[in-house]
Image: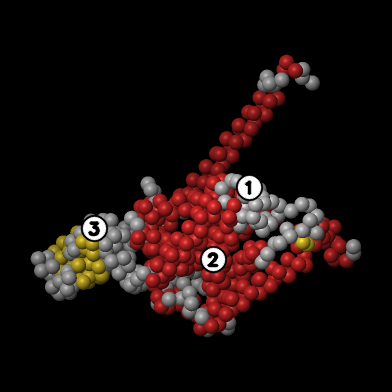
Amino acid sequence: MSGAAGWLDRRTGWRDFFRRHFTEARLPVGSDSWLSLGWVLVFAFALQIATGMLLLLYFVPAPEQAFESVGRIMSEVPYGWFVRLIHSHAANWMVLGLFVHLFHTALSGSYKAPRELTWITGCLLLLMVLGMALSGYILPWSQLSYWATTVVTASFRYVPFVGQELVEWVRGGELVGAPTFRRAFMAHVALLPAGLALVLVFHLALARRAGPAPPPVRGRTSSGTAPGAGIPFHPRFVLKHGIQIVLFLMLVFATVFFAPHLFSPLESFLAADPFDTPPNVKPEWYLLWAYQLPRMVPERLSLVLQGVAVTGLFALPFLDRGPARHPLDRPAATAAVLLALVALVVLTVLGYLA
Amino acid sequence: MRNDDDRGAPTPVADRRRALQLLLSGSAVGVAALVGWPVARYVQPAPEDEAASAVELPDDEIGLWDAKLIALRGRPVLVVNTGDGYEAISAVCTHLGCIVKWKKGRRQFFCPCHGGRFDVEGRVLGGPAPRPLARLEVEELPGRIVVRLA
């Protein structure tokens, strides 16, 4: 080994790393395209970081100027509309992808030993991505940002004992205002991306250590691949993941070019007015279920139900501990996951129609 | 080298090690508290500016059963002329914080978010609001009214 690559290898051992994790790594026989979704999500996160950094060149992080600066990005900065729409559309598709990844993992029983921590860090990533989406939502300081943030943060007051204090702490004051904006900005560009990157590295390291779960087979309880067995990760799965990433980009570009306002209701084109609530304020689609639930059951009960759902999500590997992984071999867990999925979809649709 | 009879009995070395561990753990907790307390205080909402806790209006500015939206220390307040006097009501709905609107025809406040309804004194008439709207102090002086934070 000579030259720059050899020099670097002697100091970092990158060739060995590449060999162990790519060319000599093997995935279970029968691994399908679902496996690529995780890598698509990693790519989507990287895309968010890249486009977010570009937006920071022109976005003015002050409530009095934020709306105007977003307008400038959209209409005056060369390709500003393109960067911003990719940022917002890819974020929405990323959230959808995360939900799909989560439900696929739950239905295929891939959270079972020894992958419990991979599941828990994945759930944590979902919450952090929702936090990223919410904190990013307020930054354009439009009527939609302002009032959706007001409604979402106000719902924290139902948290027992510390509800009102929590609302004021999140807002940085009694009402949504400049302190809320600054907190959201800090969370969106510093705290959450750093935290997310850290948890993501841990999640990937855990996933790599345990190896991907083989597809579940009826009546069998296999949870791993024997050393040396399976299909080489490179080039087979590198190519597969690459194709899925291209498909993801096609989806993002399709909505950016052909449905640019898909995620932008009318109120997102009006500057925030703290003295005028537009009629029928709703949060983004991924929180419509939480918006709709308190409209159907008493608010405290809805909070309890949400608490139970989130706790159940994290605790799933410890509630369903049997060795069987195929959905039909563990009907109770499968029914619970399907029930959660149906409830999520129905509440989202009802919230949309409300 | 220890014999079997000594096994389990704490040795001076083990004692010292345990004491050092306790000392280190205690120091770590102390350092965490020293760093954590200022950080926790720093991220607390800053105290609000106490200035401008009253707003003055000419008494002929609001017609009978009309309402005027004013800002009192950055908070929206609706002042209604009831004929017998004035009511100043916080426009922030007690449900999820949307801004209520005054419906002159019905003489009610109405929340556009989830349909909360309140009478002219802020009492809940319907909808999901858990508490009445906050009432503010109104002082009627010759030719003007003064609205104050209660």
User: For mark 2, does the 10 Å Cα neighbourhood hold few (<14), some (14 to 19), or many (20 or more) residues?
Assistant: some
User: For mark 3, does the 10 Å Cα neighbourhood hold few (<14), some (14 to 19), or many (20 or more) residues?
Assistant: some
- Residue of label 1: A323
Residue B23 higher or lower than B62, as above or below: above
What's the chain of the residue with tag 2?
A: A
Give coordinates of residue A113: x percent, y percent. 64, 48
Splitting the image into 4 quarters, where does residue A54 fall?
Answer: bottom right
Can residue A39 be seen by looking at this rendering?
no
Q: Is residue A344 left or right of residue A13?
A: left
Residue ranking furthest to the left: B84
Relative depth, front residue between B120 and B23: B120
What's the chain of the residue with tag 3?
A: B
Q: CA distance from mark 2 to mark 1?
A: 30 Å
Give coordinates of residue A212: x percent, y percent. 69, 56
- Residue of label 2: A95
Give coordinates of residue A138: x percent, y percent. 45, 67
For the residue marked with disc 1, what is the amino acid? Pro
What's the chain of the residue with tag 1?
A: A
Q: CA distance from mark 2 to mark 3?
A: 38 Å
Can residue A266 be seen by looking at this rendering?
yes
Q: How many marks?
A: 3
Q: Callout 3: helix, strand or loop?
A: loop
Q: Is residue A199 left or right of residue A12?
A: left
Q: Residue at x 18, y 64 (%)?
A: B120
Residue ranking furthest to the top: B5
- Residue of label 3: B132
For the residue marked with disc 3, what is the amino acid? Pro
